[in-house]
Image: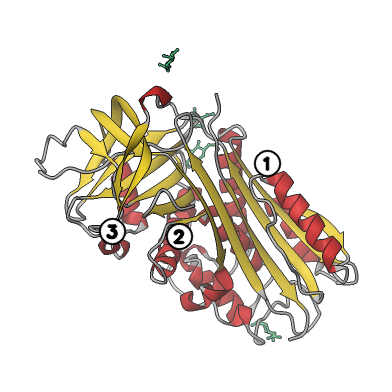
């Protein structure tokens, strides 16, 4: 039985007119590490603007911007490099280094996961628009991009064919990705990611029952709570005041749940999560028998990243000073929009399980009950590389 699940997509739209120490032998693990920090920074930006559920695909967003690195030059390129946290991986005499690392990471995740993770890249290009040969070749070489020609002047038809493409690549999970498109659009860059994983230890639906979930001190909702008693990998981050639970899928992908302790406000966690911390959780996991109570949930989110990324230092890309000279000789190109949509479904057969809280922390014996009945964080990652495929926060499992 397959569980249900997720996927995502990011797209970028280009409308017309308007240094430090490096790692000599960078590996995909170094890239994953940098990508995780980028994801955490982006998460903080999103979370500082609202207190609702959050869900997005760090890998899809990083990959989209990695391809923009190859399109840009000067300050614009530097800003993207810095925003993505990739400066330390760059070597001026090896311009292909970063795209190559993304390519290796992609190959590692998709091959080894034997298709449970599928990631695709596409360029929809206006008929008369001349793309630099080198950019197009690199997009094919490093990102296996599908290249398509579109008549963007026919807005209605282009919207249809773009939505169709995305719907197909996300196995019908992301429908109606865009509703409008500037008729001056020259190029649309699309990245999709799809993941479908069955739990290694499925929950028994017969044991699922409604139970309270404490959004905060004043708001309680009833949620379908799944139950499983088994041996799980878990750990406690005592300085942070939170517990961690790993829920593995079949084939090398896992969900990691981070559940703040009883009196811990989830917003206090925001400032503390980093790649270093994330990897330390994974390293310190220990197997023990637990009773896990985990809500079923479904989420669907859409983000306008062009409103968020300038706050992370990527300014010029979205302004008239964008330097996209490596994309095309055409002058006056800029990025008008970056949209990101993400969907997740967690149930007994697939994705997530977790549990929640109890007080009383005794160093060597964690509480046996892991009841996820208050806001929590989750991360879906590829175990060999630690690449962060998806991450999110659940404040209220009943709103999607
Ligand atoms: C883009 O950046 C390159 C490298 O810094 C520079 O030579 C070029 O003049 C810039 N072009 C524009 C249009 O800003
Ligand atoms: C993927 O990367 C990990 C970590 O670098 C490595 O151990 C593993 O062998 C790689 N797997 C494949 C299929 O390339
Ligand atoms: C759930 O309950 C039904 C009816 O009692 C039973 O046939 C089924 O085997 C149960 N499922 C599991 C996984 O225990
Ligand atoms: C599911 C799968 O094929 N996993 C393999 C991924 O690659 C590592 C290292 O090559 C193997 O140890 C896993 O078994």
**SS type, badge 2:** helix
Q: Is residue 351 left or right of residue 371?
A: right
- Quadrant where ligand 1 appears: bottom right
Q: Residue at x 73, y 86 (%)?
A: 18
Disc 3 versus disc 2: nearer the observer: 3
Q: Residue at x 59, y 82 (%)?
A: 316
Reply above or below: 62 against 346: below
Mark 2 crowdedness (10 Å alpha carbons): few <14, some 14-19, many ≥20: many
N-terminal label among 3 and 1: 1
Q: In this orientation, does residue 6 appear?
A: yes
Q: Is residue 204 left or right of residue 189?
A: left
N-terminal label among 1 and 2: 2
Give the spatial CA distance, label 3 vs label 1: 34 Å
**SS type, badge 1:** loop
Q: Quadrant of the N terminus?
A: top right
Q: Is mark 1 within 8 Å of ligand 4?
A: no
Task: Name the one closer to the observer, 374 or 334.
Answer: 374
User: What residue is pinned by disc 1?
Assistant: 171
Q: Position of residue 182 (x, y in %)?
A: 77, 74
Q: Are marks 1 and 2 in contact (CB under 8 Å)?
A: no
Q: Is mark 3 within 8 Å of ligand 2?
A: no
Residue 266's disc is 3
Task: Name the one closer to the observer, 84 or 267.
Answer: 267
**SS type, badge 3:** helix
Q: Is residue 354 left or right of residue 119?
A: left
Q: Residue at x 73, y 80 (%)?
A: 333
User: What residue is pinned by disc 2?
Assistant: 39
Q: Position of residue 334 (x, y in %)?
A: 69, 79
């Amino acid at each position: 039985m397959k569980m249900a699940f997720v996927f995502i997509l990011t797209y970028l739209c280009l409308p017309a007119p308007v240094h430090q120490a490096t790692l000599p032998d960078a590996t995909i693990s170094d890239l994953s590490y940098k990508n995780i920090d980028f994801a955490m920074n982006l998460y903080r930006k999103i979370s500082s603007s609202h207190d609702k559920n959050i869900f997005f695909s760090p890998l899809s967003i990083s990959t989209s911007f990695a391809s923009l690195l190859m399109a840009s030059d000067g300050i614009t390129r530097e800003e993207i490099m810095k925003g993505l946290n990739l400066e330390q991986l760059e070597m001026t005499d090896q311009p292909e280094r970063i795209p190559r690392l993304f390519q290796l990471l992609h190959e590692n995740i998709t091959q080894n996961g034997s298709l449970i993770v599928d990631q695709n890249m596409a360029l929809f290009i206006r008929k008369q628009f001349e793309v630099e040969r080198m950019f197009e070749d690199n997009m094919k070489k490093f990102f296996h991009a599908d290249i398509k020609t579109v008549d963007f002047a026919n807005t209605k038809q282009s919207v249809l064919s773009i939505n169709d493409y995305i719907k197909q690549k996300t196995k019908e999970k992301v429908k109606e990705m865009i509703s409008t498109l500037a008729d001056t659009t020259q190029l649309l860059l699309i990245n999709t990611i799809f993941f479908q994983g069955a739990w290694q230890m499925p929950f028994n639906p017969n044991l699922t029952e409604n139970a309270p979930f404490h959004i905060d001190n004043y708001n309680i909702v009833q949620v379908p709570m799944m139950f499983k008693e088994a041996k799980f990998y878990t750990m406690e981050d005592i300085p942070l005041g939170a517990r961690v639970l790993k829920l593995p899928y079949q084939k090398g992908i896992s969900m990691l749940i981070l559940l703040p302790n009883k009196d811990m406000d989830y917003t206090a966690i925001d400032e503390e999560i980093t790649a270093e911390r994330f990897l330390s959780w994974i390293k310190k996991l220990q197997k023990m028998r637990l009773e896990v109570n985990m809500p079923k949930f479904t989420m669907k989110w859409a983000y306008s990243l062009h409103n968020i990324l300038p706050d992370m230092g990527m300014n010029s890309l979205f302004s008239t000073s964008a330097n996209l000279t490596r994309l095309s000789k055409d002058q006056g190109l800029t990025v008008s929009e970056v949209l990101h949509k993400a969907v997740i479904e967690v149930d007994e057969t697939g994705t997530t399980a977790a549990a929640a809280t109890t007080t009383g922390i005794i160093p060597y014996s964690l509480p046996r009950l892991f009841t996820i009945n208050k806001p929590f964080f989750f991360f879906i990652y590829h175990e060999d590389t630690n690449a962060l495929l998806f991450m999110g926060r659940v404040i209220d499992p009943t709103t999607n």
